[in-house]
Amino acid sequence: MINLEQLYAYKPSFHFFARQLMYPEKLDFHPQLLEQSFAPDHPGAEEAKRYWELMHERSMEQIQEMYTETFDFQKDCALYMTYFKFEEARERGQMLAKLKLLYEMFGLEMPDEELPDYLPLMCEFLYAADWRGHPSAGQNFRMPMAILEDGTYHLVGALGKYNSPYVHLVRALRQTLKSCITQGEPVSEHD
């Protein structure tokens, strides 16, 4: 089961994840952004802090170059969460259509230029959507949580292989998501 209240409480960190996973801009590294996004007891706080420290050792130009080299040129570091499992299979198209419908159900319009399984967009959805009081939110959120679990599992492995600072960011995201799953039924087979 998904603890929707816990997920809701972590909205600021999902906004942080979304911003950090998009093409880097100077505003994304404002000194107060980390502390505004993570309380000291947040499950992903330590990994996020490690990521933040590593990124602040680099210039903006170096960060932008690293981002492009990592996410645009490394096929195994794709930010499209269904790509790892389905690549271009028909099932992926169906999954993307379901995600788009979910976003619209919770009042968010999909940008025409982006696929719904784009990790920053998925994080932005978790930040912007208001599911409180929606009777089927728990059931509806199972699919995106499973997609995030599977996609980030593969992404952490690839980022670790390249010794990328982004591995800490994605680990923080995974720890945040994992803390929102209550015992009973796993979302996926990955820890």
Image (cartoon, rainbow, N blue to C red):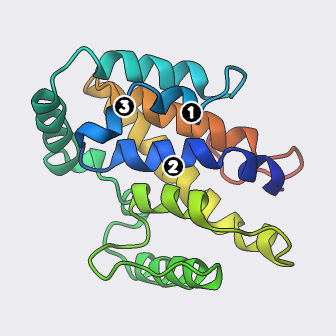
**Which residue is more in the foreground, 10 or 74?**
10
Work out whether mark 1 precedes mark 3 in sequence or the reverse, and give the earlier one.
3
Percent of width and height locating residue 37: 57, 35
Residue at the disc numbered 3: 30
Which image quadrant: the C terminus? Answer: top right
In the rendered image, the quadrant that contains the N terminus is bottom right
| Mark 1 Cα shell of 10 Å, populated few (<14), some (14-19), many (≥20) | few
Residue bearing the label numbered 2? 15
Give the x, y percent position of residue 185: 83, 53
Q: Marks 1 and 3: CB-CB under 8 Å?
A: no
Disc 2 residue type (three-letter): His
Q: Secondary structure at mark 1?
A: helix
Compared to residue 44, the image places residue 109 above or below, namely below
Horizontal side of residue 183 vs 152, given as left or right? right
Q: Nearer the viewer, mark 2 or mark 1?
A: 1
Give the mark, 3 or 2, whose residue is nearer the N terminus. Answer: 2
Query: Which element carries disc 2, helix, strand or loop?
Result: helix
Identified at 72% across, 74% down, the residue is: 140
Circle 1 residue: 36
